[in-house]
Amino acid sequence: MNDSFKFDLTAKRTRLSDKDLVLALQAAAEAFGTSYFTSTQYDSLSGKRPHSATVINRFGSWKKALELIGISGGRERQHSSEQLILNLEAVWKELGFPPGKRQIATLGAKISESPYKRYWGSVRSACEALAAFHNGSISREQLLAGNITESSRTTIPLKDRWAVLKRDNYRCAKCGASPSNNHQVELEVDHIHPVAKGGGNALENLQTLCRECNQGKKDR
């Protein structure tokens, strides 16, 4: 067997230099063509390169590492409402059903839920607004304005959630399911008339639904 490789148990691991790590980051920046990319996006690139954990351990944090190649802030890239809607449409078509925060973060442009929350209150509300636009209920200008009705799109106050649950006897208004009879039942308070179509947080516009019925309503 003519093999020159020596299986030496005392051989030392090759330590990558700071320059090697910086060059890898620069190559990734060129590949993405963006001002900011996450460690997850970096690790998803094809080809052999130092793992992001190595970079973070060497420089202290992902933010500090990016600053070495001139990328400051370490914050999420800013997206316009137009970009967010185009991405939402693409992911929705790919899935065949309205995406949630997990799907929107892992498919398409891999944008987190944060910018959708800033514009529409949640990924779900963005889906409702997009559906309303395609149904002709709102204009594209209203769709892209996003936060024009932010005051009515805020999270339902806890005291109102409690009031609705008590009013509905802690049962799903559609199927009657109750946690008292089935511990696997999860109740949610949701809007009867969607926020995207003018519905607000008034108690008469809120209802108790089990997760199954609520999801079924949203998927229609």
Image (cartoon, grey):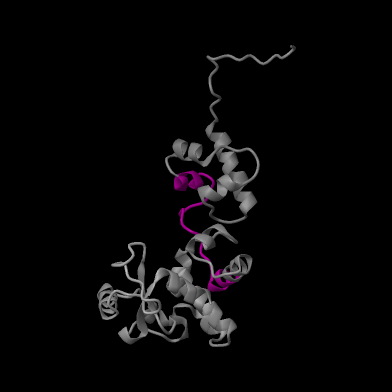
Residue 141 image position (x, y, % from top left): 55, 83
The answer to whether residue 136 is above or below residue 49 is: below
Residue 101 image position (x, y, % from top left): 48, 63
Give the quarter of the image for residue 140.
bottom right
**One can see residue 144 in this view:** no
Give the residue displayed 63% in from the left and 14% down from the top: 6
- Whether residue 72 is in magenta: the answer is yes
Give the residue displayed 49% in from the left and 60% down from the top: 102
Between 81 and 210, the one nearer to me in the picture: 210
Give the residue displayed 45% in from the left and 37% down from the top: 57
The answer to whether residue 168 is above or below residue 44 is: below
The answer to whether residue 208 is above or below residue 94 is: below
- Whether residue 89 is in magenta: the answer is no
Between 6 and 118, the one nearer to me in the picture: 6
Q: Which residues are magenta?
A: 62-86
Give the residue displayed 63% in from the left and 65% down from the top: 94
Between 97 and 34, the one nearer to me in the picture: 97
Residue 39 image position (x, y, % from top left): 51, 47
**One can see residue 165 in this view:** yes
Give the quarter of the image for residue 177.
bottom left
Between 60 and 212, the one nearer to me in the picture: 212
Q: Quadrant of the N terminus?
A: top right
